[in-house]
Image (tube, grey):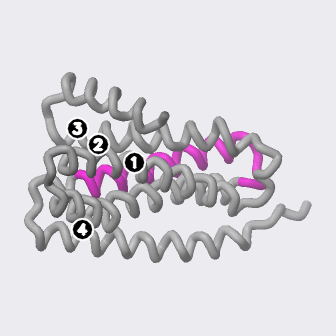
């Protein structure tokens, strides 16, 4: 459902905003916010949300689902025209880049939430704001990096995305060390 909402919202943004930098940044912002809202609505208030790392896991899971549906829509275009090889290339490129950006960006939001897990409402709110700001910045940077990029530039972009994946793996380990503060 989140992808369908994003498709319609992004179409409206495209019609209202002509500047590509602003448009791609708004698209990234909308996608990151809607993924977070899905996590907030379904997982964060759940009794299963009992450890700081849970928020990262929930955010990454929603991101994977979002990316899977979004990638399917991107692949359907070439397949509907009989361009199977183009569909395969599109799928591979989306996995290497877009899927990982979704997971890394959303996981960053989850990290911010996990870091504030044992703190009060204000700290959690600030965590959400900072997490979303970082996620939007990363997602927008990716979008802006691949617009009209040459194949060499695209590979460079994928390189820093993979670097961000390594950082998220490290943050997964770091969030496991978050414990309640002793009075």
Q: How far across and how far down the image is residue 12, in percent? A: 27, 24
* Residue placed most toward the observer, 183 or 158: 158
Answer left or right for 148 relative to 70.
left
| Element assignment for label 3 | helix
- The answer to if 119 sits in the magenta stretch is yes
Measure how far apart labels 4 and 2 are at the Cα level: 16 Å
CB-based contact (under 8 Å), mark 3 and mark 2: yes
Q: Residues within 10 Å of mark 4 (few under 14, many from 20)?
A: many
- Can you tell which mark lies on residue 48? none
Residue in the foreground of this view, choosing between 52 and 118: 52
Q: Residue at x 26, y 28 (%)?
A: 11
How packed is label 1: few (under 14 Cα within 10 Å), some, or many (20 or more)? many
Query: Circle 1 sits on which residue?
Result: 136
Label 1 to label 4: alpha-carbon separation: 16 Å
- What span is colored magenta in the figure? 117-143
* Residue located 31% across and 39% down the image: 27
First reached walking from the N terminus: tag 4 or tag 2 = 2
Tag 4's secondary structure?
Answer: helix
What residue do we see at 33% from left, 27% from top?
Answer: 8
Going from N to C along the chain, the mark reached first, 1 or 4, is 1
Upstream in sequence: badge 1 or badge 2: 2
List the residue tagged with mark 2.
25
Most distant residue in the front direction: 82
Question: Mark 4 — residue?
Answer: 157
x and y percentages locating residue 160 in the rendered image: 31, 72
């Amino acid at each position: 459902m989140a992808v369908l909402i994003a498709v319609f919202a992004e179409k409206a943004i495209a019609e209202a905003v002509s500047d590509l930098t602003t448009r791609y940044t708004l698209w990234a912002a909308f996608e990151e916010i809607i993924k977070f809202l899905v996590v907030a609505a379904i997982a964060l208030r759940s009794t299963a949300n009992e450890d700081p790392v849970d928020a990262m896991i929930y955010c990454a899971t929603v991101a994977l689902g979002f990316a899977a549906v979004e990638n399917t829509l991107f692949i359907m275009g070439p397949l509907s025209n009989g361009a199977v090889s183009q569909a395969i290339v599109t799928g591979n490129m989306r996995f290497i880049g877009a899927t990982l950006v979704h997971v890394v960006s959303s996981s960053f939001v989850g990290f911010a939430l996990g870091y504030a897990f044992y703190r009060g409402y204000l700290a959690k709110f600030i965590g959400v704001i900072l997490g979303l700001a970082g996620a939007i910045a990363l997602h927008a940077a990716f979008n802006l990096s691949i617009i009209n990029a040459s194949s060499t530039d695209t590979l460079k972009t994928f390189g820093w995305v993979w670097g961000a994946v390594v950082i998220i793996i490290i943050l997964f380990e770091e969030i496991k060390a978050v414990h309640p503060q002793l009075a």
